[in-house]
Image (cartoon, helix red, strand yellow):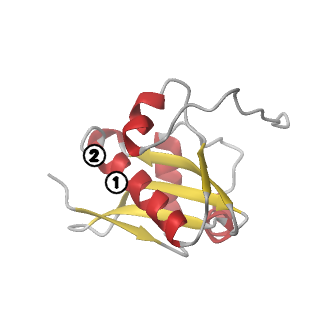
């Protein structure tokens, strides 16, 4: 069993964050890892699940917010070899509590299609419609 602590961070080694984005299938070859620190700093909350024995990140999640009322949890991922051990739930629960502690009153969640059953036990419910997205080609 892995001993994990969820930490809100202002920076983290780029290679570990890139590995997590790759594990989620979200890293594109044209992305520049030098942007990782900016991504972390631009998040309202950026949390990593840290293996207490190694000090390395084994999972992450972040919140984008106006800092006043609304926030969106996204980019929740755990390394494949550690999935199913409750780490993802720990990340989401901690992010939710951090948002509430900072006064947010509406917390949305952007998740992979078909993952709603994972989030429901943590108090999230289905929301009518689906998010829309624009992604430039390239």
* Structural crowding at the residue carrying mark 1, measured as other residues with C-alpha within 10 Å and reported as few (<14), some (14–19) or many (≥20): some
Left or right: where 13 falls relative to 26:
left
User: Which residue in the protein does label 1 denote?
Assistant: 90
Residue 118 placement: quadrant: top left
Who's the residue at 70% across and 68% down the image?
68
Q: Between 84 and 55, which is closer to the camera in this rendering?
A: 84
Q: Position of residue 29 (x, y in %)?
A: 66, 42
Who's the residue at 66% across and 63% down the image?
39
Q: Secondary structure at mark 1?
A: helix
Q: Between 100 and 63, which is closer to the camera in this rendering?
A: 100
Q: Between 43 and 30, which is closer to the camera in this rendering?
A: 43
The residue lying furthest to the front in this view is 105
Who's the residue at 37% across and 45% down the image?
79
Tell me the quadrant of the picture where the C terminus can be found: top right
User: Which residue in the protein does label 2 denote?
Assistant: 86
Residue 131 placement: quadrant: top right
Left or right: where 59 falls relative to 70:
left
Q: Is residue 59 visible?
A: no
Q: Is residue 32 visible?
A: yes
Q: Is residue 109 above or below residue 129?
A: below
Left or right: where 131 falls relative to 72:
right
Q: Position of residue 122 (x, y in %)?
A: 39, 44
Q: Position of residue 135 (x, y in %)?
A: 81, 37
Q: What label sits on residue 1 in the rendered view? A: none
Who's the residue at 55% across and 76% down the image?
10
* Structural crowding at the residue carrying mark 2, measured as other residues with C-alpha within 10 Å and reported as few (<14), some (14–19) or many (≥20): few
Residue 90 placement: quadrant: bottom left
């Amino acid at each position: 069993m892995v001993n994990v602590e969820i930490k809100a961070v202002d920076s983290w080694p780029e290679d570990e964050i890139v590995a997590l984005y790759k594990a989620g299938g979200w890293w594109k070859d044209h992305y520049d890892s030098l942007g990782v620190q900016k991504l972390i700093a631009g998040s309202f909350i950026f949390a990593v699940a840290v293996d207490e024995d190694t000090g390395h990140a084994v999972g992450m999640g972040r919140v984008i917010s106006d800092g006043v009322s609304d926030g969106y949890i996204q980019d929740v991922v755990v390394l494949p070899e550690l999935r199913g051990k409750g780490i993802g739930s720990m990340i989401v629960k901690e992010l939710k509590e951090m948002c509430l502690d900072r006064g947010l009153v509406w917390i949305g969640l952007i998740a992979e299609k078909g993952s709603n059953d994972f989030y429901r036990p943590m108090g999230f419910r289905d929301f009518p419609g689906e998010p829309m997205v624009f992604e430039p080609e390239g």
